[in-house]
Amino acid sequence: MSAKESIHGSWSSGWAFMLAATGSAVGLGNIWKFPYITGQNGGAAFVMVYLLCVLLIGIPVMIAEITLGRRGRQSPMNTMYTLAIESGHSPLWKYLGFMGVFAGFIILSYYSVIAGWAVYYMILSSMSEFTGITAAGANAKFGNFTQDPVYLLFFHTIFMLMTMYVVSLGVRSGLEKATKFMMPALFVILLILDGYAMNTNSFDKGVGFLFQPDFSKLTWSVVLTAMGHAFFTLSLGMGAIMVYGSYMPKRASIAKASFVIAIADVLVALLAGIAIFPVVFANGLEPSSGPGLLFITLPLAFGHMPWGALFGTLFFILVTFAAWTSSISLLEPAVTWLVENHRFKRIKATFVAGLIIWVLGIFTVFSFNKWAFKFTLIGKTYENGFFNIFDILTANIMLPLGGMLIAIFAGWYMSQQASRDELEVKEWMYMTWRFLVRYISPFAILIVFLNVIGVIKL
Ligand code: PHE
């Protein structure tokens, strides 16, 4: 069996792993993306499919991905390579790791641009720019900001530097401690926002939009987006959780950690949705207005509540921080691989990977202004050119595909003894997990894919 510890180090405890993995999972996906794609995909029916996907596909795949990581103790490519050889299978499995690194590059390239918006909004809020703002005013502010590529590039650059700084030091220093109080603080401030939403005249309508499903709104393309989001929000299918798993101490429980991470992640998304939709309806805004949704609605809430400027600033600090603990996990797989296979120093590896991603981010910067072309794909129209292409390619295709292969590897290729050894859970739990990763998860993903491209029609 491979080395007991990763050459990149280990978390100080199972608890530290859980914090880091929750930090990776909870991010813009929960606070920014979940609300706007829920709005675009018709609300509650989409939310139900997403929750079902987290339970039946997300959690089993997360357990599988962490298991592979802890067993392999290397970068995703070398982990897949070692485990495939160990179990007598094709070394080609390492390309699963490469696909993950590639997906991580593309995701981080746009993720960083959006995180830059949060940094900018933190500054706006601290200057009391939202006080007494109207819906039209909030719209105009967001519009003016995203119209200007120079601004977007500037904040994208800042956020990439922040990410590269932490990754170059090694993900275990510093952030572990900070996550400990940032995460609960994020919860508290979301609850304050939910309290504000409760006092708008549209609380029932907003909550109904999230939780009263109208299943006639479901199409296969909506189902794919919900499934893709389950992977995105749990950081699955590209090796992020796999590398974090490779630093996990042997005695910590993988199954327990996976449940805790998934529950915390879903809670943050739902709390964000409950804060946002009542404000959307109370102000006559469009739930389907797209990536600007968070940045248009929350200034309205902060602009009209007591201590709004303070809470607003705190909120955007916490969003930036949540994005930061996610972005480092997007970069980490590539960096570990460059260190292992190319003998790069961590600093150099971070710089090289970070630079490529920064350049790629320029496509997203221009997606909201100069290159904001529209396109239609399987009946849906997208307005923000490359940004939407990058998002669809990764969240709707690469992550589910990566997750499907991870499930197949863990369920069919890895020896039972190896996975039993890592999981150490009660027999019925092990058998349930094994059944899910062998049959349910891969087939569910396949069926959604085949329906979307029209090969089968259910
Ligand atoms: N899960 C993160 C979020 O919801 C994004 C992410 C995706 C991080 C994939 C790592 C890997 O914001």
Image (cartoon, grey):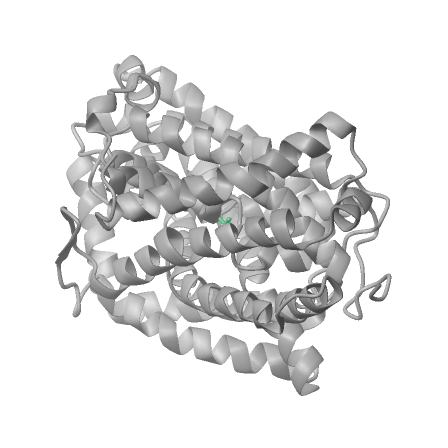
Residue 166 screen position, x and y as percent: 64, 66
Seen in the image, is 109 located left or right of residue 268?
left
The answer to which quarter of the image holds residue 325 is bottom right
Q: Quadrant of residue 196?
A: top left
> Horizontal placement of 427 versus 436: left or right?
right
Q: Quadrant of the C terminus?
A: top left
Quick check: can you spot residue 130? no
Q: Determine the residue positioned at 44% across, 51% down.
A: 400
Q: Position of residue 448 (x, y in %)?
A: 34, 42
Q: How many marks?
A: 0
Question: Residue placed at 30% from the left, 26% from the top?
Answer: 45
Q: Could one spot residue 202 in this view of the protein?
A: yes
Residue drawn at x 33%, y 60% as measured from the top left? 393
Q: Residue 378, image x and y in percent?
A: 17, 49
Furthest residue in direction bottom, as rendered? 343
The image quadrant where one finds the N terminus is bottom right
